[in-house]
Amino acid sequence: MKILTDKVEPTRLDLTRVNALTQKRFDAEKQGYVQRLGSGLLMFRGRAGTGKTFALIQMAIHLARQGQRTRIVTYNHGLISDMARSLTIIRDYHKDISPVPKIETRWTLMRELFGLAFGANAVSRTGELYDNLEVREAVFLHALRHPKNFLKEKMPCCAYKVAGKSCLCDPAKCKTWADISEYSEKFPAPYDFLLVDEGQDWSTEHRDLMYDVFGPGRVIVADGVDQFVDHARCDWERGDIAKNRIVRLHTSRRTKAATCDTITDIARALKVQDWDVEPDQTVAGGRITVLVEPQPRRAIERALNLLGEDLASQPHMRPVDALVCLPDKAATPGANYCNLFEMVQEQDCADFWRGYDWETRQNREYPSRQTALRAVLYQSCRGMEGWTTLCMGLDMFYDRATAKPEIDIEGLRDEIKADMGFLFAKSAFEERLAAEQRAYAVNWLMIPLTRSMDHLIIHLTDADSALAHILKSIDRDKISWR
């Protein structure tokens, strides 16, 4: 694993970020909950760009200075790479921070806890039986939450059985999980504090397990108000737990004031409920450019040319400070934006980092070179930021999210039936479903729109698309059209 191993040559923006993360003095509000760390749940709650992940890392660094072992957990591989880059710089420039906070996926955390409870044999056996990581994590969670039932269950003899296929295994050799388990009902928490990123997308079962293992006082959560993309939103404020502080964040800590102000206009045009992100008026500037280009490769070339203008006019900026967000193939039939991006970069002999590449994600590789332009899929851009951010094919991504939202339709129908009883009507269900579909698409749209620090470049494939009409309703003086 490459996390915290490669040497990173930091840019000026990197050093500014690291200096802010490692500051030792806190304002009066922060001092209150920092002094009470360990007394109860600490949660940072806010919309995109208000500094939730920043606050999480800052708390991890503060705890590390106290000699506490911390683990930051998320399942966004792009964000893991961004965090790992910053933590590597902190390791090299701040020797007083030890042990350096570690970052991992939720899946890795669950495997570690499962191993502590049931032993290495059980871990290796699940790896042999279950290829799908999500299924394997579900097994881990089920076992940890219901260990007595799990130990009694018959273990599948082979992967064929798991897949519902016939096999040649001897039925007499079937075992229960207890036969290979070294079950430990009580085991020490593997680290002192757990810091949960994107807590809104965890399940209540995961949440309760974290409280059981670490205790609410050793859990710190970053909770996105509008960034949940799962079927249900997790509420970490369980009524029976002690709380340190629920910190509500409203001021944009990422985006310059002018850009933030325009994003607020877009949110209002989209009718995002209760959008309350306030621009930081001490950070002036920022701009939004909309680029209309139906031809995908030409669009990438034009967008990269705009980025090149930024690099030429701002000497402090390096390619690694920028971010490119790309749609996946499902959103753009007939065009593979990832492949086209690579072709254009290679044609220009330009360096880049494939945040969308499976091998890059598996090896936890982060961009160590200043020349490496970072590129990720929209699905992995949460928590990430770029001085200049390119959003390619954003109208097609939005249309896809609107047309095919990941919504549990039958579950929603059952919920409405339970609420309305014999008054249930098809029209009421269809109205609620349409609202849920729209909310899903808008939530996803606001995530890439809030990734930029200075210059947001939005590429549209169609000047008459739904998103284009929204952007055209905004004051023309606030958006530059190309």
Image (cartoon, helix red, strand yellow):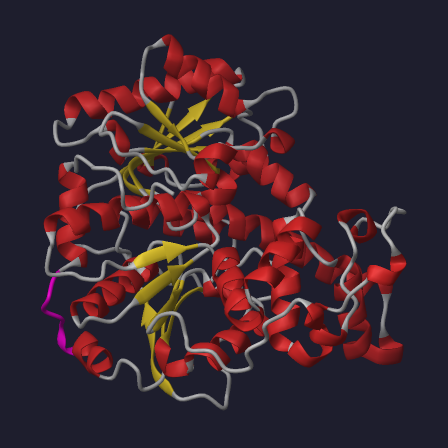
Q: Is residue 220 above or below residue 476?
A: below
Where residue 371 appears, as percent x and y from the top left, is 25, 25
Q: Residue furthest top?
A: 347
Residue 386 in sight from this viewpoint: yes
The image quarter in which residue 418 lies:
bottom right
The image quarter in which residue 274 lies:
bottom left
- Quadrant assignment for the N terminus: top left
Q: Residue at x 14, y 47 (%)?
A: 92
Q: Is residue 135 above or below residue 463?
A: below
Where residue 86 appears, as percent x and y from the top left, is 24, 47
Region in magenta: 23-28
* Relative depth, front residue between 239 and 452: 239
- Is residue 155 toward the left or the right of residue 439 in the image? right
The image quarter in which residue 315 lies:
top left
Where residue 281 appears, as percent x and y from the top left, is 18, 55
Q: Residue at x 53, y 33 (%)?
A: 327
Q: Is residue 394 magenta?
A: no
Q: Is residue 303 above or below residue 171?
A: above
Secondary structure mostly taken by the magenta-highlighted segment of the chain = loop
Q: Residue at x 26, y 34 (%)?
A: 368
- Quadrant assignment for the C terminus: top left
Q: Residue at x 85, y 51 (%)?
A: 169
